[in-house]
Image (tube, rainbow, N blue to C red):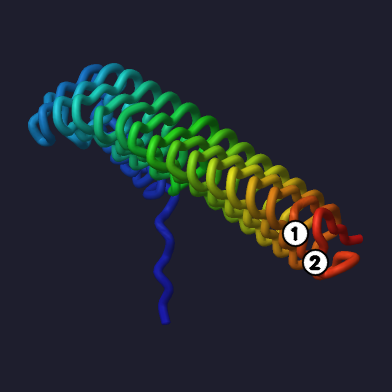
Amino acid sequence: MSRIAPPSRALRMPLALILSLIANGVQAAAPAPAPIQLALYDPIQAVDSERSVRGFRYSLIWGVNQDVSGLDLSTIASRADGNVRGYQFALFLNQVGGDFIGVQTGGLNIARRGFTGLQFGFLGADTRGGPMRGVQFGLAGSFAEETAGVQFSLGGNDATRVRGVQWGSFVNAAKDIKGVQAADLANVAEDMAGFQVAALVNVAEDMAGFQVAALVNVAGQMKGLQIAALVNVAGQMKGLQLGLLNFNKNGFLPVFPLFNFGL
């Protein structure tokens, strides 16, 4: 079976030159970012939605672009399918398909692939598609995949992984947290290292640190201190419990009033 001979050196050089010219032509054909965007409702806007904006964008109802850098304002809502760098405000919705660096304020704020900076939503803040580094506030709720910083809400906070602080008026929930959970009602964590404080209930599957609650503390595996006005419960505990009733499977007694401890 005959083999196809590779192109000669004389042919390879022109071929490489042609491919280089094609690549440069495609790159040159890519539209440059527009300095200004004025949008009524996509596609009724000064700059096409496939172009990026570097400078200023204003959307009256709904503006759509790729990357946006600079000042981004909207009376109703806006969307960036790429990344955003700068300050963004929308009365109802800021939606970013990529990652966001800067300050994002408005009704509902969404950054699909990550957030760095300050995110403030009157309705909510959502960065579940990527890491959140900085401060996240959602009036109704804050949601993040991975948080390094502060997550704050008058409703509830939910994050898979937290390195920092969760504070919620109602409920905080985290799968893996190292830091502080503080809630007016309840804190729930699967793997917690740090400090849980709640007006009503703290719950942790695996806890190393301190639990303080006005009513009830519950932990599957506990190393540290539990303080509650009513009841402390631990499946296996190494540490001290202070409360009206204290349940500990490996305590000096399985249940004892006022205090209990396990070694």
Point 59% across, 55% down: residue: 175
Give the residue type at disc 2.
Answer: Val
The numbered mark at residue 255 is 2
Camera-side residue of 30 and 178? 178
In which image quadrant can residue 239 be found? bottom right
Q: Which mark is residue 58?
A: none
Pinpoint residue 67: horizontal percent, then vertical percent: 32, 32
Residue 129 position, x and y percent, is: 44, 48
How far apart are labels 1 and 2 at the CA level? Answer: 7 Å
- Vertical placement of 201 versus 141: above or below? below
258 horizontally vs 187: left or right? right
Drawn side of residue 202 relative to residue 239, left or right = left
User: Considering the image in quadrants, where does the N terminus appear?
Assistant: bottom left
Mark found first going from the N terminus, 1 or 2: 1
Residue bearing the label numbered 1: 245
Q: Residue at x 54, y 51 (%)?
A: 173
Work out whether 239 lies above or below 116.
Answer: below
- Image x and y of residue 42, in percent: 13, 35
The amino acid sitting under disc 1 is: Leu
Quadrant in which the C terminus is drawn: bottom right
Residue positioned 30% across, 25% down in the render:
89
Disc 1 to disc 2: CB gap under 8 Å? yes
